[in-house]
Every structure is written in C-alpha cells, then in structure tokens.
Image (cartoon, grey):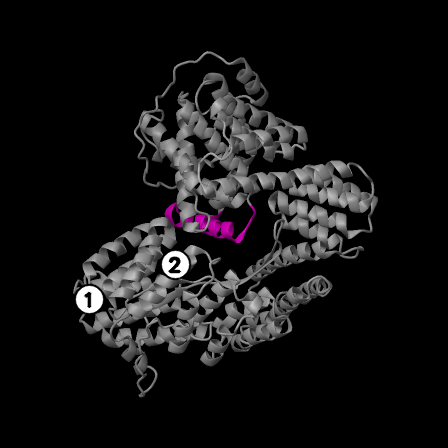
Amino acid sequence: MRRLALVVIFAAGCRPASTATTKPEARATAPAQAGDPELEAVAAKLDPGPQPPLHEVLPPWLKARVESSLTGDPKSPKRIAEAREAIAAWDKLDTRDAGSMMQTALLFARGLILAERAVVAGSDDPELLAALTKAYGVVDSLRLFQRSALFGQLLELAIATARKEAQLEAQQIEEALAAAGRAVERAPSLHMHVTARLLREHPRHPTVPEVLVRASQAKREAEQFAEAVALRRLAVQRKGARATGGDYAELTGSCLTALDLACAEEARALAAARGPEEAGEAKAAAFAKRLADLDATATLVRRVAEIGQTPELTLQLERGHLLLKLNRLGDAEATFKAMATAHPSDARPLTGLAVVALQRNFDLAIATRHVRAARELANHDRLYYEVALGTVPLVMIGELATQMTRAPEAPPPNLDAQLAELMALVHGFRAHDPARAAVLELLFTLTREAMPKFVAKQRAPALALLRKLPEQALALTRKFPESRDAWRLVFSSTRLLADPRKVRLLASAPLPATLQEDPDLRLQQARAQLAGALAWEDEELLLTAVKSVKSLPSGVDADAAAFFNATVDAIAGREGEKALLQRAFDGFTALAERKTGKDRALALNNAALVVAFSGDLPAAMTILERAAAADGDELAARLNAGALAFRMQSLEGLPELFASVAAGAGTSSLRLQARAWLVALAEAGHGDVAVTREEFATAKREEEANEFRGRVPLGRWGVVEQGDFKVSLGYSSKEGLVLLDEVEQRWWLVVPPARMDSLLAEKQGPKKKKAVKQTKP
C-alpha cells in the first residue's frame, strides 16, 4: 500500500506537462436540480461530513511546491477538463512497465490535486465530483495492493525520481511516506462525502449509477456487505432499461459475497435474460463463462450455509477457507481464531490466519509469525508448508539485507540458523511435493555455501559454486522429468556457465513429451538458446534458437512470440536481406503500436535499426526520436542515434553522448559499445586514440572481473541484452506456492562500430579472431 501511495505523493511535487486534449466544456458551477428523496436518504447514510482535501496531508515543503506549480483560476473550464482527463488516465495504467506506471501516477496525482482545488474554490461540476469519487476510490484501493516486486520497483523509481527531479533528502522522503499513509487512511471518508454531494446536488446526472457502483465496491472491500448490495442494486435500478446483463452479473457477485442466495438467484436470472452487452460469438462465450463462475461461487456459498456453526474442526477449517475465497476476510479470521483457541495444538488454524494476513494486505510479518508459531504443533498439511515457504524466506531476505546494510563487511550472524529453518521446511514439504522440494533444497544449499564467500569477497570460489547450478538442475530433471521448476531452473541458469559447449547442451536439452507443448517452458528454452547464441556468438545455437522461436506453441504470449520472431529476423537479415528485414520491421512496428513506456521504446528502437540495416539512415533517425520520446531514460536508443549520426558524418556532441552512455548504461555490453564508439570518434579526429583505447581495455577488464555470467556479451552481432536472473519464492491465495526462476530478456538492436572486431582482437593477442559468419533462418 505505502509503495504505490508514495508514488502519488512524490508525483505531487513534480511538474508533468499537461496532456489534456478534452475540449473545455465543464462549467465552474452547475445548475441546481430538485432533490431526489431516495438518493438524499442514501447520501445521509454515506456522508461522514465535510472533509479536508487530501492534498492537505502533504508536508509543508511539498505543499508549497505544489501550490507554486499550479497557477490560474482553479475552477476554470480548462483546469476542470484537465483534472478529469488526468484522473481518467488511471484506467490506462500498464502494470507491466514500472516506468509507464510512474508516468501515469504523475498524471493521476496532478489530476487529483487540480480537482480538489477546483472544489475548494467552489466548483460543483457533476463530472468533476464523479471523477473525484473515482480518484478517492483509487487511493483507497492502494491498501489492497500486494507488496510485490513490481511495486518495489515502482517505489525505487519514485524515490529516484524524487531525489533527481525534486531534489529530496532522506527526511523529506520519510515525511512523504508518512503522508502516503495518512492519504490512504483519509481517502474512504472523502470518497463517501463526495459521493453524497453528487447524489444530493445532481441526482439526475448520468454519472449517478457509476458513482453508486464505486461506492458499492468500496463498501464491499470494507466488508460492509449489506450496504454494498444495496448500493449496487440501486445503481442497476437507476440505469433502468439501460442496465445490461453485465450489470446484473455484478449484482449477483455482490449478493453472493453477502451470502444472500435469494438475491443472487434473482439477479443471476436477470443477467441471463439480458445477455452480453455486445453481439458476437466471443462475447457470448465470455459471458457464459462469467455466469458459470458465478454458479461456482454460489456452490461455495451453499456449502458455507451447510456447514454453519458445526463445531467439528475439519468442517470449520473448510468453512474458513471458503470464506477466504469469498473475500469475507473478517469472518474467516474470526473462524480461524476460534479454532485456534479450541484446538491449540493444531497447526491448521494458525495456517489459516497466515493466509488471511496475506490475502488482506500481504502482511509478511504477521503471516510469518503465525507459521512460526505453528512450527511445533501437529497437522502440518501441504498448505502449511506452502505458506511457510512462501513467506519465511522473504522475511529472512529482508533481515539479511538490513544486517548487510548496517555491517556490509561482517558475515550475516544468523545465516546458519535461518537456513536450517528453511531446510526443515523443505524436508517436511517432501511428503507433499518431492520434485519442488528437491529444487528448493538445491537453491537453499547453494545459498548456504555461496553467500559466506560473497560476503567475504571470495568472488571466484563463490562463482564456481554458482556455475554448478545448471548441471545440478539438469540432474534433477532426470530424477523428476516432469518438474517444470527443475526445467525452468536449467534454462534460466545457463547464463551462469563459462563453457559454451555446456551452454549449447543445456539450452538445447530435449523436454519430455508431456512438456513439449508447455508454453512457459518452451518460451524459457527459446530465451536461453538465443541468449546463449548471442553471448557466445554461437551460430549453431542461433540456428537452434530460430527453430525454437518459429515453432513456439500457440499458448505462448502473442507479444513475446512477436518480439522473438522479429528479433531473429532482424539478426538474420541485417546484411540487407529485404524480405527478412521487412518482416522484422512489420513485427516491431505492430508491437510499438500497442506498447507503452520501455516496451514501446524497445520496439521503436529495433524498428529504427531494421530501417538502418536497409540503408535509410534519416528515416531510422526519425524513428529513434520516437523511441527516445517513449522512454527518455533508455540509453540504447541514444547510443544508436549517436552511431547513425557518426555514419552520417554529424559528429557534434557525440563524445559527450557516448561518454554518458558508457557511464550510465545498465548493461555491460552497452557500456562497451559506447566505449568502442569513443575509440572510433578518436580515430576520426575527435579524441585521443591512445587514451580511448586504453579506457576501452580497462573497461573490458573491469566488466569481465565483475561479470557473474559465463561471459561478457560483446554485442558484435548488433544485439545487446537487458535482463535479470530472477529466483524468488512467494505465496498466492490463487496459485499456492509460487517459485519463480527465469530470465526475462529484452534484446535491443544496436550499431556496433566498424572496428569493434579489430579492437577486441588487438587486446586479446596477436591472433585475430575469425569473422562471424551470418546465419539466416
């Protein structure tokens, strides 16, 4: 919760350019309407009374900065239109891209503050009030976000942006964090007050039904189920003949969460009678599935009613978990607490309480406390081990990170005890899932052996241990041939190998017949093959990767498959084969049309390079400008723009550009490419040749010394990789124990300097490297 809320707080101190395109049709005040007794009664129940605006929680220094950035009449039609559009931008939030999320949060925060200022200044514009109900609902909902890796990245990005653009100090960041918490606490009351205002002042405005729906959702999330049903039913009634089958399906869901079967059955019948909103076979199938899901939920509700208050432990445990599925967290918590009191020696009620903590707000501390309290109790079932293994390691990682921050040179004091706790959980988990337990045991054992060496700065022995992982994982696939976890670990860890023959062998290891059409594994294998081929400049493995890419099963994400296909076409066609280049260009441009942020910048950069391969450098430069606009922080597109400018004999500013990429790029291959271009510039008369060559050689040695992968990718084939080796554990109420081990790469096309080969060969001795033969799929 605090992470994404903090983004909104930080955003308040930034000055994003206005993006409003709506014609300013809003009025500062709206004509008065006669009251509606029914809505006035609802408003009276909802309204907690006037509330201070949300931006009042900002620290004084940040509030002053915000107010100084917002000039003009706050309730002018232009400002009101801008506020509404900025709040509406939240609907386009792209959760796959932290950078794009940050930009959306910036825009949303500005819209929220503009809207509040307009209302404080006297505006009663109904559409503005409706937009504010949406905005407050968004802020309120932030408490429900799980503290996932994605939002961790977003928090880091928000802090970095705040420090860079707003020049914030540590104390100011802490104040902003506190303000974020207060904002989330106050949002529900503001939401209900603005809702009540709209219902009283504009009872016949067309936004009334959607505002009632938002209020219903807020009540449902607050576990005020009867109120949620009443508001949802009223919203449907106010729509009248415009109410759709989808509206009645949503009402059915609210009724089921309230355990009101009669209400649900009536609404479900009306939903079926109205049918889907749009015609078409696909829409009909989706609507039918929606009704089927509601029917399945109704079965859960009936089972809850059947069990009732029967005191038998297993039945009450079942009831508690059914209530969790119905998102009745308070009732589930009460059930598990009662069972824990009645059966203090049984681990299962405490496991249930741990799941409640995770599902409510992903509170790892409370969840871990419950599973540790259950450690010495009886009846450790599969759920216990999955919850424990999905929470305890995450808490330990946080503790280790804190210890290492305080004393980076000292070995972690409790590492042995912590790993012993994890190994005990793994041993217990074997009875339920021996294959997954074996993978976890391998990873925990490696951690126990390698971490002390890393802490002691014994890098070479630590890396030697890490580089055993791929073959150890492959050995597990022989024992557990259908273990998806083991195969994923094989493919993701091939980048650790320092032997190209082993890379080729493991990346091309045949999957068993039962997993041949597994979309995720096939994608991971193709990634490993292409990454290995590019890192080791292995033509044979490139051919294998191309075959894998061209035969990916239909279940693979369409965009991932499209990126793969366009990338291998570009690699094969970069010497000018028009058919391949056209196919690559079409693929990248189609992706750019539907992507945002970094993904859009990647697609545009690669499309530009394909155009450059075809010989049209000015057109390529134009596309690179669009790539830079999509993600201004991405350095690959800037490097390519400089490389093309060099080829066009436009050298002004290139030394500074290449130096900035060499210093700031996040990947070793991109940094080396920039260093090589500095050498090329020097040889063209813009720099000291001897100095730049020595700087390149030094940089290459340092990159090789710091590289944990088997080899520093050089990018001589015109492709550099961005990607992270991710191994993590977690628990999901829908999926159970989640074991993530993958590398999600982005492949950026680049323009290597013409003298890259000779530059590398010069530093490797008198024997010149054999030129790389181009391979066509």
- Find disc 1 in the rendering and name its residue: 647
Residue 683 to residue 640: above or below:
below
Could you say which is closer to the camera, residue 472 or residue 152?
472
Quarter holding the N terminus? top right
Q: What residue is shown at x 71% (from left), y 57% (from top)?
A: 382
**Observer-nearest residue: 602 or 686?**
602
Structural distance between the alpha carbons of marks 2 and 1: 30 Å
Relative to the observer, which residue lies in front, 229 or 173? 229
Magenta region, mostly helix, strand or loop?
helix
User: Alpha-carbon neighbours of circle 2 within 10 Å: few (<14), some, or many (≥20)?
Assistant: some
What residue is drawn where x is 79% and y is 47%?
Answer: 314
Give the extent of the magenta segment.
Answer: 146-170
At a point 54% along the width and 73% down the height, the residue shown is: 470
Kind of residue indicated by mark 2 = Ala
Horizontal side of 601 relative to 239 (left or right) equals left
**Does residue 165 show up magenta in the picture?**
yes
Instruction: Choose top left, top right, bottom left or bottom right for residue 434.
Output: bottom right
Which residue carries the number 2 mark? 562
Residue 503 lies, in percent from the top left, at 47, 76
Q: Are marks 2 and 1 in contact (CB under 8 Å)?
A: no
Residue 138's mark? none
Q: Earlier in the sequence, mark 2 or mark 1?
A: 2
